[in-house]
């Protein structure tokens, strides 16, 4: 073999070796794929109802109201290789996204999973509140002090866990009511808060200070809400996180508390966050969630209005997209779909 031929052989081998090593190198991307779906009207993996209600008549009509999930591969400490990323880019049901999309810089996998778990817990509570309010069932609200800012008027006088019962003698019904009453004051005004602490009520008087922009008075607390329910609602989903199942939880609770199936015998799946007033919000991974729903057998997919554009572009065949903006709107759409009467909102172009 000539020196030229030998050089070409060696060079070709090195190039091949570099290519092999290159495609196996870890890359800072995450692969998002269709995850499992869970029927909120059925039982969980332990054989118990995914949603159970105690202390109220329940109508077990069966059917499917499935919430959908997204599975992922990759992340800090377990990155995918370039070959996997390339395959994902070519797959119709997989999205390859920058690692920071799922794992913000400075956060570990454990941090993200902990946040997702908390988001799931919050979404369940909001879903119960929204469902009961939809049915005109009274839900008690407690306004609690989440944190106190150092150096502010409340420092040393209020504590995390204190319940704000009244502002200047007027009973409060939620954080919005406290904010409204405070906004009627001017910086420098004194305000008296009636506080429930350790089972005892006491009045705490504070001199307000101006916000940094001078627009409103502050006392230096962050408030949150806790709820008192007239009966017990338990949601058990296992190792699933995030806020995107809120809408489907609310629908299932409404279905269980009212006679007749909300689904009308159709296999309904969907997604969407929900707030305590029943407003539905957008979610991530809409393409993967639609694929998961269709694979599970769904023919109707409840789609947050703000996700419609992306959903229409990737909707699987046989899956009807129903646009939803609120819990009441979703119920109306399902009723119209089942009866054949009335408007069934769809995603534009879908």
Image (cartoon, rainbow, N blue to C red):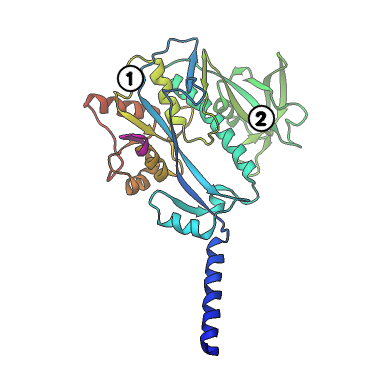
Depth check, front residue: 64 or 46: 46
What residue did someone put label 2 on? 146
Depth check, front residue: 176 or 250: 250
Residue 261 marker: 1
Confirm whether the magenta stretch covers residue 209.
no
* Mark earlier in primary sequence (2, 1): 2
Which callout, 2 or 1, points to the residue nearer the camera?
1
Depth check, front residue: 199 or 211: 199
- Look at 49% across and 59% down and name the residue there: 83
Residue 68 lies in what quarter of the image? Answer: top left
Say if 28 sits above or below 265 in the image.
Answer: below
Q: Residues within 10 Å of mark 2 (few under 14, many from 20)?
A: some
Residue 278 seen:
no
Left-right relation of 328 to 166: left
Residue 161, horizontal then vertical, whole percent: 69, 24
Position of the C terminus, as image quadrant, is top left
Residue 127, horizontal then vertical, whole percent: 48, 26
Residue 290, horizontal then vertical, whole percent: 37, 41
Q: Name the element at disc 1.
A: loop
Residue 170 seen:
yes
Depth check, front residue: 99 or 5: 5
Q: Identify the magenta region.
A: 295-302
Residue 97, horizontal then vertical, whole percent: 49, 53
- Look at 34% across and 30% down and name the residue there: 268
């Amino acid at each position: 073999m000539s020196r030229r031929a030998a050089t070409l052989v060696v060079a070709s081998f090195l190039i091949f070796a570099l290519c092999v090593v290159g495609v196996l190198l870890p890359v800072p991307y995450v692969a998002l794929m269709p995850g499992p779906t869970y029927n909120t009207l059925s039982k969980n993996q332990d054989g118990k109802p995914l949603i159970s209600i105690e202390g109220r008549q329940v109508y077990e009509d069966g059917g499917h109201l499935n919430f959908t999930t997204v599975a992922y591969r990759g992340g800090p400490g377990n990155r995918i290789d370039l070959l996997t990323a390339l395959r994902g880019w070519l797959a119709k049901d997989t999205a390859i996204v920058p690692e920071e999309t799922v794992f913000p810089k400075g956060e570990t996998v454990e941090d993200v999973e902990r946040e997702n778990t908390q988001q799931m817990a919050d979404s369940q509570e909001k879903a119960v509140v929204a469902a009961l309010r939809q049915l005109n069932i009274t839900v008690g609200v407690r306004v609690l002090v989440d944190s106190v800012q150092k150096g502010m008027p409340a420092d040393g006088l209020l504590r995390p866990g204190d319940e704000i019962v009244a502002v200047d003698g007027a009973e409060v019904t939620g954080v919005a009511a406290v904010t409204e009453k405070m906004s009627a004051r001017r910086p420098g005004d004194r305000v008296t808060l009636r506080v429930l602490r350790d089972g005892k009520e006491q009045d705490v008087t504070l001199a307000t200070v101006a916000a940094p922009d001078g627009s409103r008075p502050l006392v230096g607390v962050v408030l949150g809400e806790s709820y008192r329910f007239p009966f017990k609602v338990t949601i058990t989903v296992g190792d699933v996180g995030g806020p995107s199942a809120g809408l489907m939880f609310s629908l299932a609770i409404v279905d269980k508390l009212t006679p007749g199936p909300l689904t009308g015998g159709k296999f309904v799946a969907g997604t969407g966050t929900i707030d305590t007033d029943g407003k539905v919000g957008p979610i991530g991974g809409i393409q993967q969630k639609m694929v998961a729903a269709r694979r599970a057998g769904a023919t109707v997919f409840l789609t947050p209005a703000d996700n419609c554009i992306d959903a229409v572009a990737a909707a699987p065949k046989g899956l009807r997209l129903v646009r939803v903006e609120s819990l009441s709107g979703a119920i109306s759409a399902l009723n119209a779909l089942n009866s054949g009467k009335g408007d069934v909102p769809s995603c534009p172009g879908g």
